[in-house]
Amino acid sequence: MPAPHPFALAAGLLLAAGGCSGASGGGASAGERPKRTVLIDTYDDAAVGKETARDVEAEIGVLDDPALTAYVEGIGRKLLRGVPRRGFSYQFRVVDQSEPNAFALPGGYIFLSRGLLTAANSEDELANVIGHEISHAALRHAAAQQEIARRGGALASPWTRATNLAAYSRDMERTADRNGQRLAAAAGYDPQGMADFLDTLGQLERLSAGRSRPRSFFDTHPGSRERAAVNAARARELRWRRDPSLGDTRASHLRRIDGVAVGERPEAGVFEGSRFVHPALGFQIRFPDGWRTSNTNRAVGAISPRGDAVIHLMADLPPGDPRAAGEAFVEKTRQDAPVRVKDSGPVQIGSIPAWRMSLQGSGRGGSLAALVTFIPFREATWRVTGVSPALSADRYRGRMLSTARSFRPLSVSAARAVRTTRLRVVQARRGETLARLGERTGNAWDPARTAIQNGLLPNHRFAGGESVKIARVESYRSEP
């Protein structure tokens, strides 16, 4: 994985945070021909999809759960029997993202997040969503988005570019809904699952209204109660027969997702307020209070409330002499953009001898200043990079220095104190309300969220014996 220079990466994060997925997103700079995505045939689909899928997997990470991946692939292969003509080989991936999300890239690359799997209440619902994404790929909807690569500009993150590529028109969404339901019905799944799933996601979206969140399903799939109603009406008109081998599709789905993490996974590091801890890699670092944090497979970082500064941590360099690492980094970044070293020298980060550089360069918005600290720790040289416009450098310098100085090894006791929240399936007792069930089982969700996550009404009272999804906070162990 190539190491992007600090200005490009910072600009990319700033663009992604600014919501650059709109139709009027950034274009090419003056005098530069805008890049276009023109998918002429299925070969182009496969090439573009492969490249973008590789970027997405590198940025957000694929979930290392062979059983869950096999489950999704199995449903996908069953649905593909109803696709009349395949111009490419379909690939199914479960990405390590807690928000409900699903999208298809050109060439048949289908992505579903673990958050989407835990939001679904049955295999029927999941099959309809996968069928919807297969339809986008099979109908080559991305080929109709001729200007999509221009949106957000070349510095937007791979995740932003991928979700832009999957941002289809409402007519395309309606077509994918219709064909996805037909694929599900042909495979023996209940086509009502699409309407049920959209209803659940709509309620979750309303519950989360006003909260800061990463891009999710509704950013690329316009949702509405009307759309769910249309799908419900269509489901009643479709002729289908249940595949008896599927059995109880809710029970089988809940068995598959029991134990899946909800929220952040300690294996990838977690934020505790502004403090980021990584029990598996054994370090901690604190970002400025009040800044918006982000944790991807490539970098962890935070962006200022004004959106004009970013601090991120990466480990894309081998361990060794931090000065040599810094000089090599600068030399490499100069291949992409002019960078001037204003200051360079040794520093002490706790008990670790490190190296710091003050750099200056240019971005799309003008002159940028960067403060980069190279910290050798265990099997990597960690790079703490703070970037802001040159005119704001003095304003943010103290917070950038404090962040770098906060890098520390994580003690054994602190690692043991890290907690994780997992989805668990429990059995309801006769006469229990959602509140009583939550108290008995240690449910971290409140009754309102528990109701939505299980497709129930808030005042539901159980008959007894029903399987119910809850969230339980448990101890994390970095080693089995």
Image (cartoon, helix red, strand yellow):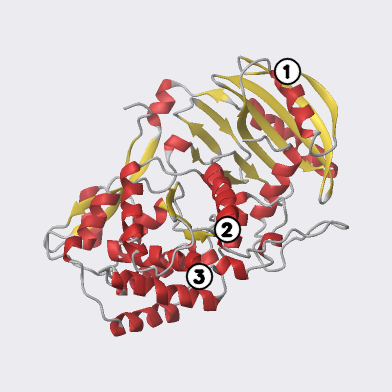
Residue at image point 26% right, 56% down: 253
> Closest to the observer: 390 or 331?
331
Picture layout, residue 337 above or below residue 330: below
**What type is the residue that disc 3 sits on?**
Leu
**What type is the residue that disc 2 sits on?**
Tyr
Residue 4 percent location from the top left of the image: 70, 38
Mark 3 residue crowding within 10 angstroms, few (<14) / some (14–19) / many (20+): some
Is disc 1 in contact with disc 3, using a CB cutoff of under 8 Å?
A: no
Q: Secondary structure at mark 2?
A: helix
Q: Is residue 247 visible?
A: no
Quadrant in which residue 215 is drawn:
bottom right
Residue 217 percent location from the top left of the image: 48, 62
Give the number of the mark in front: 1 or 3.
Answer: 3
> Closest to the observer: 182 or 171?
182
3D distance between C-alphas at marks 1 and 2: 43 Å
- Disc 2 marks which residue? 43
Q: Is residue 62 left or right of residue 364?
A: left
Residue at image point 37% right, 40% down: 420
- Disc 3 marks which residue? 139
Mark 2 residue crowding within 10 angstroms, few (<14) / some (14–19) / many (20+): some
**What type is the residue that disc 1 sits on?**
Ala
Q: Across the whole image, how many numbered discs are drawn on residues?
A: 3
Tag 3 or tag 1, which sits nearer the N-term?
Answer: 3
3D distance between C-alphas at marks 1 and 3: 51 Å
- Disc 1 marks which residue? 324
Q: Is residue 476 visible?
A: yes
3D distance between C-alphas at marks 2 and 3: 14 Å
Residue 210 percent location from the top left of the image: 53, 63
